[in-house]
Amino acid sequence: MIPVNPDRFLADLHHLRSFGAAGVGKGVIRPAYSAPDIAARKWLAEQYAGAGLEVAVDPCGSVFGLAPGKSLLVGSHSDSQPEGGWLDGALGVICGLELARAGAEAGVPISAVSFQDEEGRFGVTTGSRVWAGHSTLEEADALVDSTGVSFAEARAAMADMVTGPVDPSRFTGFLECHIEQGPWLDEAGEAAGVVSDIVGIRDMRMTFEGEQNHAGTTPMHRRRDALQAMLRFQSLIAERFRNVVTPQTVWTTGHVEVHPGSHSIVPGRCSFSMQWRDGDSDRLARMEEIIRTAADEVAAETGMILTTSAMLGLEPVPMDPTIRAALEAAAEAQLPGRWRRMQSGALHDATSLAKLMPVAMLFVPSINGISHAFAEDTDEADLVAGLKVLAEAVERLA
Amino acid sequence: MIPVNPDRFLADLHHLRSFGAAGVGKGVIRPAYSAPDIAARKWLAEQYAGAGLEVAVDPCGSVFGLAPGKSLLVGSHSDSQPEGGWLDGALGVICGLELARAGAEAGVPISAVSFQDEEGRFGVTTGSRVWAGHSTLEEADALVDSTGVSFAEARAAMADMVTGPVDPSRFTGFLECHIEQGPWLDEAGEAAGVVSDIVGIRDMRMTFEGEQNHAGTTPMHRRRDALQAMLRFQSLIAERFRNVVTPQTVWTTGHVEVHPGSHSIVPGRCSFSMQWRDGDSDRLARMEEIIRTAADEVAAETGMILTTSAMLGLEPVPMDPTIRAALEAAAEAQLPGRWRRMQSGALHDATSLAKLMPVAMLFVPSINGISHAFAEDTDEADLVAGLKVLAEAVERLA
């Protein structure tokens, strides 16, 4: 096993959370391009340099520590949600730093990376998507955050650090360690999950438009209440999904807008988000059909006009069999009987890189399944166990 | 019949809509204390004076045209919704003006009024509620509109018009003509509705609080999705109301707030309005019991914390038998077989005045039941028919 140093690893992980520390538990506030995010990336670049790696910063602000020649790339992202946990992204970044550092000591070339804007201040996994060629820098520059700041304006704050593009062909593959962000490992008392695949996602916005009217004088049978149409739609799809979904399938309406939003007015319009995720493209398509059919039926039944936005679709991404096998063998050696194969229900930078190079992921437990919240945490023994699984897997691959 | 003049009446009604004309159909934009509202009230005061009435403006900005001695009060309100119709309120005000004018000519003392802020920029029927003593001027002064302007600040814009309090004891009763704001008369091809009672209303805000979580990694069976709890609640009450409600009963959720409102986050909190109306206090109470029980059950089933706001309650208001009988006799004489007795599902200034003096209301049809919208309209023949029913009823009461 590459000689990773758990104490140094934990110390760096805790140091990273000093950038943007929320003052609530171990939480951090370190959105992409915020002052704490840039400070953290400067500190990280120094650590890479101190480990003998060549520091490179691409135009998006993703920070690389490059080993000489061809190497495996290990990392994640160090930007956080507006109210984030200390491990989401950060764990993978510090795993990359420690592996690259220990690799240099052991003569195994390992490069490390922290991608920029994974958390979506501007998009979804913006830094890794641009790097992997899913969108151009010009397209990304036009994105704006919720306050109207553009990506172009935001990344200018890091312009002095940029060294230029980083050639993806120098990497043999990408390995990302991440907290699970779900309850399965914690619930089972297991220490690691080797990711089989990252689920695909479908996301759209739907709107029922009926008739806005007086809540006192409009009899129930005469109403075209857009909220009630949305409710009917939700119960229809829940019923029809039963024969299609697996226990891993999820669907969510997280955003709802009822117009005009007055106690005394029958709502004339209801817009809502509809998102569903599954590891199987065919199942995602069957769910889409149920969703569209149910919405059409409800619109016809209730006299609504139905409009739907363009649908965002990301296909499921299988992990590379070779790296995955190395992770499984390492997990069984390090944590016999205390690991599992599992899907990732969340997107990660690995999703962006999958078309470019072999990718694989390792999960460690999230206590109570909490993530994207200050309360997010993982037992330090599990953090170290994850690091050791990675170190052994990398040695097996070398 | 008091010698009302339909042409003069219609001309004044159209003139009133020139104040704040929306430029869309016949619609008006004349919220309480806006420049067009104050201009309209100045014009109205001149018309009262021109008809030989004593003009009085109370501290809220309600404008009275006072006949000498004891008299019937006829009127409504001339402020409008932010996007209002030309008749809502205005019709009753111009009916009052024309009746007072024709009454003066015929020697029947009739006073007229336009109450202020019936449409609820600050509250509900604020002007008539303060005048009738339901709340004090000091309490009203503390109310703020949606932009943070206080009632005290807003009414200062009319301070130069104020003459002082108006003594309610000088009036023998209050008669209000209003568009139906619902579909019943128009659907039946009838010309008038004599209001039997104004329904009671219950209004509250309810909140389910579950657990905000990741929409990709949180399995369906582990979710405590506050939106889904709200949906379950809505379908439960709809089911249980069936044995309790009449075709006149209504219930509405018009305002919904889903927190944090992101496509990728299972909503942890859902706040929503719950309003119900019926002419029978016992039925309102039975509905309240169903609502509270269902909400408790859903909270227990789904692991939500349920909180409810204080409940606003206005009791049903029966119309005065004497004035109502006069209206019914007048309707039958003027419009044989083309009128009905009916409930009012909307609140009106008459609600506020009911504890103070005998009140009654006459409805005329709303084309397609539309109200609180620029498209609101009524056939001019129906407007004139309504005026004549009022004139005959007033003569019968004199």
Image (cartoon, coloured by chain):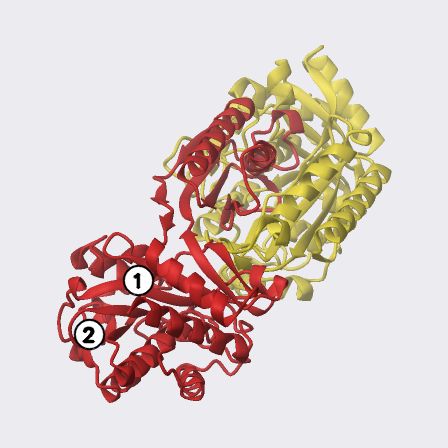
Chain colours: A red, B yellow
Residue A148, numbered label:
1
Q: Where is residue B354 in the image (x, y as percent from the top left)?
A: 78, 43
Other residues around mark 1 within 10 Å, as few (<14) / some (14–19) / many (≥20): few
Question: In terms of secondary structure, where does tag 2 sit?
Answer: strand
Residue at screen point 26% across, 57% down: A129
B280 sits left or right of A238 in the view: right
B146 sits left or right of B287 in the view: left
Residue at screen point 84% across, 30% down: B321
Considering depth in this image, is B342 or B53 the residue closer to the camera? B342
In the image, is residue B204 above or below residue A389?
above
Can residue B349 be seen here? The reply is no
Type of amino acid at the residue the image marks with label 1: Gly
Type of amino acid at the residue the image marks with label 2: Val
In the image, is residue B155 above or below residue B242?
below
Quarter the N terminus of chain A occupies? bottom left
Q: Position of residue B280 (x, y in %)?
A: 83, 36
Residue labelled with disc 2: A57
Q: Position of residue A162 (x, y in %)?
A: 16, 75
Can residue B313 be seen here? The reply is yes
Considering depth in this image, is B69 or B222 the residue closer to the camera? B222
